[in-house]
Image: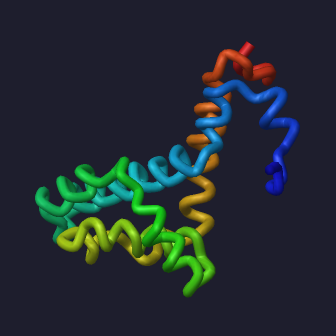
Amino acid sequence: MKDTYESPLNSRYASDKMKYIFSPDFKFRTWRRLWIALAESEKELGLNITDEQIAELKAHKDDINYDVAAAREKEVRHDVMSHVYAYGVQCPKAKPIIRRRQYRCNNYARGHAAYTQGACQSSQCPCEVCR
C-alpha cells in the first residue's frame, strides 16, 4: 500500500547521499554534534562542565532515541526541545549541560548550514560554487 506522500524530487532525482543529508538521522546527529561542540567550548571558557559529561554526550551522539523524542514531542509540540529532553534521558550526568536554550533558530541555522555544506559537497550539486 502506498498511503504516504512521496516527493518526486526525492524518489526520482535525489541521490542516496542527498537523501541521507536531508534525513532525520543526519539532522539529529548534526544537532548532537553541535551540542557537544558547545559544551566543549563552554568548558574551555571556564564553565563548570566535566570531561565525564562531555564523554557521556559523545558516547550517545549517534544512537538517537527516537521513541523518547517522539513521545515528548506529543507533549510539548517542539522538535528541538523533544530531542534535548531525549538526549538528557540517555545522558543523565550531562543532562544539566544540555542547554534548554538550544532553541529552534540556533539549531536550524547551524543545522541547515551543515546540510547545505553536505549537499554542496555532493557530486550532484548544480550550484555555481561547487562546479
Q: Residue at x 56, y 86 (%)?
A: 75
Figure quadrant of the C terminus = top right
Quadrant of the image occupied by residue 15: top right
Above or below 79: residue 52: above
Q: Residue at x 36, y 52 (%)?
A: 63
Count of marks overlaid on the render: 0
Between residue 116 and residue 62, name the one nearer to us: 62
Q: Residue at x 59, y 32 (%)?
A: 118
Q: Residue at x 43, y 77 (%)?
A: 100
Above or below 90: residue 74: below
Above or below 131: residue 52: below
Between residue 29 and residue 34, name the one nearer to us: 29
Quadrant of the image occupied by residue 7: top right
81 sits to left or right of 90: right
Identify the residue at the far top of this view: 131
Question: Residue 13 at x, y = what percent?
Answer: 82, 27
Question: Residue 116 at x, y = what percent?
Answer: 65, 38
39 sits to left or right of 128: left
Identify the residue at the far right of this view: 8
Above or below 19: residue 74: below
Quadrant of the image occupied by residue 104: bottom right
Between residue 75 and residue 40, name the one nearer to us: 75
